[in-house]
Image (cartoon, rainbow, N blue to C red):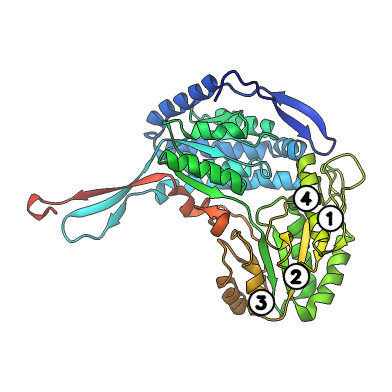
Amino acid sequence: MNSQVKHSPIKTVNPFTNEIVKEFDVMKPAQIASIIDKADEAFKSWKNTPFSERAKIIHKVATIMRERKEALGALATLEMGKLLAESIYEVELSADIFDYYAEHAEKFLADHPLDVKHGDAFLSYEPIGVLLSVQPWNFPYYQITRSAASNLMAGNTMVLKHASNIPQCAQIMEDIFKDAGLPNGVYTNLFVPGKDVEAIVSNPKIKAVTLTGSKPAGASITAAAGANVKKATLELGGSDPFVVLEDADVSEAVEVSVAGRMWNAGQVCVSPKRVIVPAKMYDEFLAKTKEAFSKLVVGNPMDATTNVAPLCTEKAAEDVVSQIQKAAEQGATIALGGKRVKRTGAFVEPTLITDITPKMDAYFEEIFGPVFMLYQYKDVDEAIEIANATEFGLGGTVFGKDTKKAVEVARRIDTGMVYINHVTGIAPELPFGGTKESGFGREQSIAGIFEFVNAKLIRTTTPDKAY
């Protein structure tokens, strides 16, 4: 990083008003190096801190978050625009994840005995050092929590490069960790632009990287990590299928899919972006979807009557409209919406697109906004073909009354997670992650805590039986 380059400040811009609220100076290379040095020094003691002591602190983080959930929720809504109720739910979910790992980490990482012919052998799970966490804006607290809860309980330390449009959410989480009693250096926020991340990965005291973001960002980070022989985990978005089976209740499927797609104004990696229904129920499904859209209220995310919020930035809104326009130019039908809302703020009309074919970009890409794409199929084989047509493989849904059949269909979808009769969800005890170009690695559940520990083999035997 060139210390002579002057960076634009990192800003909070309220997407409801497009007004600048607060600015933060970009950290200089010397500051960043000092923070990483402190994280490395803190690791030497944190890794030896008993699980019980770590758990007290992490439980306290959860308690503080619940106590401050209204203020934390309002801050997330201010910075990235989601509905206040969604923001508060996110805070509560994050607290649950912190509690989950505080309660279970010691059991998860207990020595694991191995069955050997002579003597004894076991795996000892040990932390590896300073982790770099690179996270996006769409879930300001949850994205931090997914990587921090497990890894701090495992004994690693962490530096966070959060999205540049939510600096106050990034800072307040560091403050909460300090208020909970986390030792200095164990978790620290970095105010840096995305283009400086590769240089941070190269710091020899950074031992691994976890990133949630775009495919280009993931490719860049894994290249830097690979060049320095460091492990990485990635979650790079999705274009989740929502497959409706012939025995499904149409009204219920419409309600669930529309609500799921409009969650967080469509800015969710695992929202049902492609709804795939049998041809014989297509007309009914389309009519009921239009009816559901007529009840959507776009407006102030702080207002309880609003159910579609602005997008996170003006640039995000412009990009989504550009994708919709390209779909129309390539022959898709824009059945509803498709334009900017005529008001201040980063708003896009809830949009319904039909008649999408493999000749169109929209058939394959992810649209990160309130855009509902409806497909029809003649048989289950065609439904699976549509579901698996994209490069993504994060989540998905199969909707139908016959659970056994729904599970059979779920097994054929190339994705990391499939939910039956529910949009792809989130729970502390359930692993989260994808396949194909949606990334690799898992967060949450028991799986999440093993990503960045060293599974060290320890073998004991008598000299005459040694191998």
Q: Pick whichever of labels 2 and 4 is earlier in the sequence.
A: 4
Do residues under tags 3 and 1 come within 8 Å of each other at their CB atoms?
A: no
- Rendered location of residue 383, percent (x, y): 67, 74
Q: Which numbered disc covers residue 350? A: 1
Query: Residue at label 4?
Result: 320
Residue occupying the point 17% across, 55% down: 119
Do residues under tags 4 and 3 come within 8 Å of each other at their CB atoms?
A: no
Give the camera-side residue of 8 and 370. 8
Q: Residues within 10 Å of mark 2 (few under 14, many from 20)?
A: many
- Quadrant (top left, top right, bottom left, bottom right) of the N terminus: top right
Mark 3–mark 1 distance (CA, rounded to whole Å): 27 Å
The label nearer to you, 4 versus 1, is: 4
- Rendered location of residue 461, percent (x, y): 15, 51
Can residue 212 be seen here? The reply is no
Q: Which numbered disc covers residue 375? A: 2
Q: Which amino acid does label 1 sit on?
A: Pro
Rendering quarter of residue 271:
bottom right
Q: Residues within 10 Å of mark 1 (few under 14, many from 20)?
A: many
Tag 1's secondary structure? loop
**Against 436, is 306 above or below?**
above
Q: Residues within 10 Å of mark 3 (few under 14, many from 20)?
A: some
Q: Pick whichever of labels 1 and 2 is earlier in the sequence.
A: 1
Q: Which numbered disc covers residue 382? A: 3
Q: Pick whichever of labels 4 and 1 is earlier in the sequence.
A: 4
**Against 208, is 413 above or below?**
below
Q: What residue type is labelled 3?
A: Glu
Q: What residue type is labelled 4?
A: Val
